[in-house]
Image: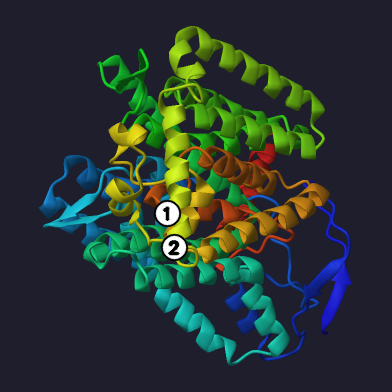
Amino acid sequence: MGIHTRILRTRRWNLSPRPGIALRNQSPEHSRTAAITGAATDDEGLMQRAPEHLHPQVIAREIALISIVIIIVAIPAILQLGLMSWAAIGGLLAFALVYPRSVILAIPAMIPLSFQPMLLGSFELNVLEALTIAGVIGYTPRFLAGFWKLTRIEPEDRYSYMRTIVPDRLAAGIAFLLVIAGIVSIIWMADGAHAAESLRLARWTIVVPVAFFFLIVPILRQHADYRYIAVGLFLAGAVVSSILALIDGALGGGVQADAVTRLSGIAPHPNALALVLDRALVLGILVGVLFRNKIARNWLIPSALVAVVLLLTFSRGAFLGVGAGVLLILVIAQAGRFAVAMLGASVTAFVAMMMTAPERTLSFLGGGSGSMRIELWQSSLNMIADHVMTGVGLDQFLYQYSPRYINPAAWPERFTSHPHNILLDSWLSLGIIGLIVIGMIGLITYRHVRTALLVQDRVTLAAAGALITVAVHGMVDHSYFLPELAVSAWLMVALLPPSHEPVIDDADLEETQEAEASEEADSLTESEGER
């Protein structure tokens, strides 16, 4: 058999006919191909669909393993003890060799909690960086073994396997283009005296996020439920970060600004907290309300807590970003009732901000930080005029801005390290290529949204909404060039492709089948007992 066409129908969606890959029925490579692709096969040699949902025991086991990973990296980061950090790194690497998937899936949960580094002597290792390195080390032997086995199977089966581990071509192209932009940025940076800063930011916002992207894509394609697990872990991390912010605020923490106390929690600034929470909030809201799934409404409970804390950061950019991301996707998905409800909630939140912090709410463009941003943008445009093609380089803005380009009226903000605008920041950090990368991400988002509407894939639409939030909030603040923001952005890109046909790996399939068989046996025993 070769390429065939079939109609996939599940309770979750209907798909029009699409190409699928058949395995050879009597070929000696048959069982080997199934093992490599991680798919089960039926008696006719066709790839079987995975169970519609992973068994709860499989999910519980995965969550338990992820929790162990989080504990390993969180404790030394919180206590800031060098010896403990070294021990944690050793334990993490050993764990990754056995359970690399759990290490990678722990990254979404740690994004909102990654503000504290792990201390390794005089070197600071970001938590997300540590997890990604461990994931690379853990998966490398598996990928090498898989590619070796590829040489022993038929070409069409090889293509089937590659589809399960390689991102779509446009997404992979964006990743490679970003790497090229980073290399160009380092070569042509404006001030070589600050090369260390550029190299550090390249590591945090290009190398690590791109590596994370290529590692998590195969996981998300193993089964559709892993996409929900990744989103749920990101939202769970946001909930924990929100609770810590509330506790910190109750103990007198936070930042005083414009006659109001802004919650910051473990983040270095309220805006830094808001930049992470708004992405998780949009994911939670949209997964919870799209396509009339009553069970999915449970996502709104943790989202409500995150929303309250996000409001208490008094981040106006987050308010605009969340409103735009959620409303636009609801309108596109023709969820009129929820769109009206979201609009009402936005108006209510705005009125609440007006009543509690009128100075901050109204000063966005009429003075204060709002007018400072306008001066900052003008200075950034002047900087671009002198570095049109290559920009000034990663993490070089601060050293060029003051005193060469700063407007005297903005002198109180002379230590600003970025232009507070996603377009200006990308242009100055990565040159013209940075703008091309943004355009390509917009294109891939548009393409996947169209497909997601056909198959009613709420995760894809939620990820698109989060990327819209990134763009809107990024027009007035940071958007990408921080470790947690870069990794979360690539998480959204990885979540974009809809799950047409889940493929499950052998271990999870076997565990799911064993659990279901056990439940059937227990049910049969109970029935015989009643007789």
Asked if 335 appears above or below 101 in the picture, the reply is above
Q: For residue 387, which numbered disc appears in the image?
A: 2
Please give the name of the residue rendered at 37% of the width and 17% of the height, measured from the top-left corner. Answer: 258
Percent across and percent down for residue 202 are 36, 63
**Badge 1 element:** helix
The residue under label 2 is which amino acid type? His
Percent x, y of residue 204:
36, 58
Point out residue 320 in the picture as x, y percentages from the top left corner.
58, 30
Q: Which mark is residue 383?
A: 1
Q: Is residue 11 left or right of residue 491?
A: right
Nearer the observer, 285 or 139: 285
> Which quadrant would the C terminus be assigned to in this image?
top right
Query: In the figure, residue 406 lies in which quadrant?
Result: top left
Q: Picture quarter containing residue 301?
A: top right
Q: Cβ–Cβ below 8 Å for labels 1 and 2?
A: yes
Identify the residue at the far front of this view. Answer: 408
